[in-house]
Amino acid sequence: MAPLAGPLAAALGLAAALALDWLCAARGLLPPGFREPWRRVAAGLVVAVFLGAAVFLPLAAAVTGAVVEPPNLAKIDTFQLFELHLIMIAVMALWLLLGFAGRFEPPPVPALPSQHPLGWEEIPGEDLPFPPPPPPALPVPLGRQLLAQLGFLAPDVPREIGLGLALGLGAWLAVLAALVAIAGALIALGGKDMVPQQPPALVPLIAALPFGVRLAVSLSAGLVEETFFRGFLQPRVGIVLSTAFFALAHLSYQQPFMLVGITLLSLIYAFLVRWRQSIWAAIAAHALFDGVQLLVVVPMVLKLVHGTGATGKAPAFLGLLG
């Protein structure tokens, strides 16, 4: 890998973490624990390291001309399929615990200038009792605070999941149709080389795994990726940046054309979260999209291609995973 790729990825990760911190402060979303500087710095560094390695390293490699050695697909075990998702969970957990775990004193409330020292308000010509202060708010359990911070609280979770499944099916059809149309236009305009002839190598590998593993991959992608990009990042940095990060995280596919479909999917999920004010519908839509691809479409097409004695090439868009 080119020597500048690593420092560039680290610089971009640090810039993204600073943008997250600044936007949180501008929107009044800084956690109470960040009043302690060491917590704020530590949380920022955790995010910077993750974004630098998982989101910006493929971009930095492309910019600097670095050659990224592809993983040895024959040696990838089941755990490695979930490794990135586990790291995402750890990053969110550390950031939220640094921000919310512990007891923090609320900012002092200045005394009203008209309040009598004994608790009576002085009104000329009258002696009326000063309204009693409101009862102290009950402390919110830490677990519920964290669920709220990530968009998991909803009045009717099953209804949100059902809505997400219905919209996810429509999103699958719409995005694949858009990719076919774009690919056709590029080919008609002489840009055939811009359309990949094969899906990413990892996708057929996953599609050949046992049904239960493929189902787990689909559910994990829907749950963890939506929690990170839409539940954690989107309320804090906005739809544009969270969508950009989501697309760049898939640049490791090494197929820029696929970023078109991934960006479309990300925008659909983003506006779904904004509309529903929770992430359950987006989780369901995302998991459904990946499940249909990995459980049905890719295995069926690969079996058809190899079973008919064709050249072994499958349409690249069939390897699209959100």
Image: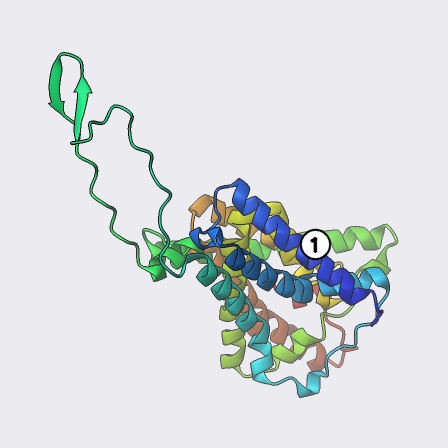
Q: Is 29 left or right of 77, judged from the image as shown? A: left
Report whether 72 appears left or right of 84: right
Q: Is residue 216 among the parts visible in the rendering?
A: yes
Q: Residue furthest right?
A: 190
- The three-letter amino acid code for the residue at tag 1 is Val
Point out residue 69 in the picture as x, y percentages from the top left corner.
79, 77
User: In the rendered view, does 240 fall on the left or right side of 181?
Assistant: left
Question: Can you identify the residue that label 1 sits on?
Answer: 260
- Residue 222 appears in the figure: no
**187 above or below 293?**
above
Which x, y percent locates residue 227? 49, 60
Query: For the point 65% across and 53% down, which residue is it?
Result: 16
At horizontal 72% and vertical 67% (from top left) the residue drawn is 252
Instruction: Tell me which colouring the rendered structure shows.
Output: rainbow
In this image, 124 relative to 51: left or right? Answer: left
Q: Quadrant of the C terminus?
A: bottom right
How many residues crowd mark 1 within 10 Å: few (<14), some (14–19), many (20+)?
Answer: some
Q: Secondary structure at mark 1?
A: helix
Name the residue at 35% across, 46% down: 106
Q: Which residue lies at the image location 18% right of the left edge and 24% below the top edge? A: 121
Q: Quadrant of the N terminus?
A: bottom right
The total of numbered circles placed on residues is: 1
Please name whichever residue, 202 or 121, is drawn nearer the observer in this view of the structure.
Answer: 121
* Residue 76 drawn at (x, y percent): 65, 84
Q: Nearer the viewer, residue 243 or 63?
A: 63
The image shows residue 45 at horizontal and vertical percentages of 60, 61
Q: Nearer the viewer, residue 139 or 41?
A: 41
- Specify the farthest residue to the bottom: 75
Seen from the viewer's position, the closer of residues 162 and 219 is 219
Residue at the extreme front? 117
